[in-house]
Image: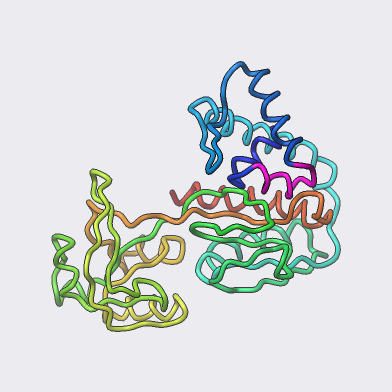
Amino acid sequence: MRIFIRVVERGSMSAAARDLGIGQPAVSERIEKLEAHLGTRLLRRNTRNMSLTHSGNLFYERSKTAIQAAEHALLVNEENQSLQGKIRIAAPYSAGESLLMPAILRLQDQHPSLQVDVIFNDNVIDPVTEGVDLSLRLGDLSEGFFVARPLGIVRRVLLASPALLAKMGDPQSPDELAGYPFAAVSGIFANNRIQLLSSENQLMNVPIDVRFRATHWRSVFTYLLAGHAIGVLQYPVCRNEIEKSELIPLLSHFQLPSFNAYLLHPPTVMMSYETRICASLLEGYLKDSLLEMS
């Protein structure tokens, strides 16, 4: 089951073999034996790509649940021991500040002697090659010598302040967004377009008029609160302001594509005791937070 999960998550048997420290023929043989034991095909394979069958998709989801439950059970003694030493964690600014920091506080409440270094960086950081133990990442992942644990999704919201809406009115359709000043984080919406999903799950590319850019999400957040523009924020960073009606979601019949969230760590054989325990605890904390906000 572990080998099958790694093959699916890495997208190839050769990449899974490197992670697991075994040969590709051994991986292929194990998958074939697994399919024979189950009496069904799990993977469609050809010389160029690989995809899951319906049975393979079901087995993957159930295997993940079973393996995670087993790992959690095996930590019953280790989680009662206080961790020492230092752990370095990388995270993007917005998710790091709004999601990771509360999880780290819970982690250090449980293990007060643990030293934690957090590196905020919006670039994808490979924990094997770039000197960190764990990495929280959003969106699509590139190839790397790491294991990615899915955590859930981070929703994004199109917002405006009540002051701006009182002055300019609510947009009634995506076509009207170009008539509003827009604030964005640098590197996002660089083509002056925003993607929206309709209630029929149709993807639309809508023109916008970006008047303000900043390298940090908090500057955009401040700009929106001040009523100078509309803009997009990740839901965890603006949840309280939405609940207090200080920021108002726009175009309720449309959604922005969400980000998938992952906790990255080195292959298990390369992980320290502290990293293994921290990864398990942080995964649980972050999954709970994202489930609450879904």
The image shows residue 214 at horizontal and vertical percentages of: 41, 82
Magenta stretch in the rendered image: 13-23
The image shows residue 152 at horizontal and vertical percentages of: 51, 48
The image shows residue 205 at horizontal and vertical percentages of: 25, 61
Above or below, comparing residue 183 to residue 291 in the picture: below
Say which residue appears at 30% left-offset and 54% top-offset: 255
Say which residue appears at 50% left-offset and 29% top-offset: 53
Q: Is residue 204 magenta?
A: no
Specify the principal SS of the magenta part: helix
The N terminus lies in quadrant: top right
87 left or right of 96 in image? right
The image shows residue 45 at horizontal and vertical percentages of: 55, 34
**Viewer-proximal residue among 167 and 270:** 270
Say which residue appears at 52% left-offset and 34% top-offset: 52
Q: Quadrant of residue 125?
A: bottom right
117 left or right of 55 in image? right
Looking at the picture, the colour scheme in use is rainbow
- Total of numbered circles in the picture? 0
**Viewer-proximal residue among 21 and 1:** 21
Q: Quadrant of residue 179?
A: bottom left
Say which residue appears at 73% left-offset and 34% top-offset: 70
33 left or right of 290 in image? right
Q: Is residue 16 magenta?
A: yes
Above or below, comparing residue 204 to residue 212 in the picture: above
